Image (cartoon, rainbow, N blue to C red):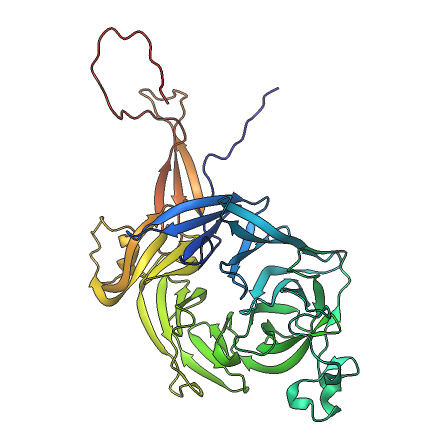
Amino acid sequence: MQYQYVVSAHKSSSVVSAVSGPFLSPDEQNLIVGRGNRLQVFRKTATGHLDLVGEHAVNSQLQHVRFFQPSDRSTGMLLIVSSKQQFAVVVWDMMLKTMVTESTGKFIERTGRSSTQTLVAVDPESRVFAISSYQGIVHLFPMGKRDAADQLPFAVQDEHIVGGILVPEYLRNGAAGASSLARGRRGKGREHMAKSTDVHGVSALYVDELKIIDMCFCRDTRGPQLAVLYEDADMTRRVKVYDMVSVRGEVQLVSQRSCSFAATSMRLVALPEGAVLVLGHSYLSVYKADGTSQSLALSSTDVCDVCWVDLGRSERLLLADSSGALTLVAFDHAAKGFAASGPSISRLGSIPVASAVAYLGDGCVFIGSHCGDSLLVRLLAQSMRVEPADAQLPGSNVLARSNGVAETATYVQPLESFTNLAPIVDLCVVGQGPGQGQKVAGSIVACSGLRNTPALRIVRNGVAIANIAGLEAHGILRVWALT
């Protein structure tokens, strides 16, 4: 009987998710990258390169990685969601120099119908995070310390409840509108679990939206507000904003406002003052807290990922689309809301088709890709000329063209490139040796990359010996290693 020994010769190099924040220490901006089942932590050096600090393996495939920082902590925390419908909250232990798991849990519904994708949203104030993995069900995980009365930070008073349903502020003058409010029902899933002193028990709330496209938590709100982009039975895509409250220890969702948008709407981004940015195919729309919306044309196609630049000090958003274009959207945030003229949109240059974008400070941006090599780039205030034949710059072949058309100027300067073999479309084994038919281990020629980064890569697995130093000596009989 013949046996085969199968082993991974190359670790996963495709980027699933990437986030940034003060994870190792309060005084530095770190990069956390998820590849396959590995979580990598990088530190940016003074020369503008990334230095690998630590690596943590997960017993599952990573789906989402989110960074959040509670107000009572000097460093941030990571929320990790895996393909096994499990989550974990990890922190960095400065004494042990490794990642430590603070809480774990799972969100399995044995009677629910799984969605085509798993969505994760974290409240900007680190009060709660939400996961949507089943049709019509949203799992909510409250966070933070409870008070002396065992109430969550966003609990409401009993006088604001009519018939067991919370009445929002705009209806508290009378209880007539309470019956028209949507009310979430607490689920009874058999596999709900959360082990932590900071992450409380999960609430599985049933909502009317069966096909959820995206969701996010609003910013600058008194209590947590969850915005949901969904498609209804009439194939119309709408955005509904829910108020999230804790009523007598039980979390509820109360519908606040709703509005319809274009059929190509794909992504939601939280804006200041409770506004929501809706991104679609070649358009964006600002959905304000007062129920009004404002739309603008966008040169980008389907947006793959977004990233804020200096969040808190400016309102600039980076968009990476499916054609490999990097676009900067700057919002003019006045004292009484957004300017009537709307945000300004500028194209910065071409990049690999991104699966994750993370801003590291000082104009440095990490572009993680599944379709090609990942890049560390710097955003420039003035455009620079790009030479297609310039092989000294990493990733210059991508920056020099856009949709097959050569570009002569760009605001994106590549600093470092990270090789990625994924996705391998096809491969073949090429034998080596002086004669044909000789059975020796050869190299693998792989067709890698997609869209604007196709490539042929030669991969060889083996042991090589390199001559580092040499010294002429005669009559040597034995050699010892000195430590």
Q: Is residue 337 above or below residue 62?
A: below
Q: Nearer the viewer, residue 426 or 394?
A: 394
Q: Which quadrant would the C terminus be assigned to in this image? A: top left
Q: Which quadrant would the N terminus be assigned to in this image? A: top right
In the picture, measured across the screen, residue 214 lies left or right of residue 377, that is: right
Residue 211 quadrant? bottom right
Q: Does residue 420 appear in this view?
A: no
Q: Nearer the viewer, residue 257 or 235?
A: 257
Residue 291: x and y in percent read 55, 86
Q: Does residue 148 appear in this view?
A: yes
Residue 458: x and y in percent read 35, 37
Number of numbered markers: 0
Q: Write the residue at 75% across / 68% down.
A: 186
In the picture, measured across the screen, residue 384 lies left or right of residue 451, that is: left
Q: Residue at the front extreme?
A: 148
Q: Write the residue at 46% across / 84% down.
A: 294
In the picture, measured across the screen, residue 267 lies left or right of residue 392, that is: right
Q: Write the residue at 58% across / 62% down.
A: 119
Q: Nearer the viewer, residue 262 or 365?
A: 365
Q: Write the residue at 66% across / 69% down.
A: 210
Residue 308: x and y in percent read 42, 68
Q: Nearer the viewer, residue 158 or 135?
A: 158
Residue 423: x and y in percent read 44, 48
Q: Residue at the right extreme?
A: 163
Q: Is residue 334 above or below residue 381?
A: below
Q: Residue at the bottom extreme?
A: 173
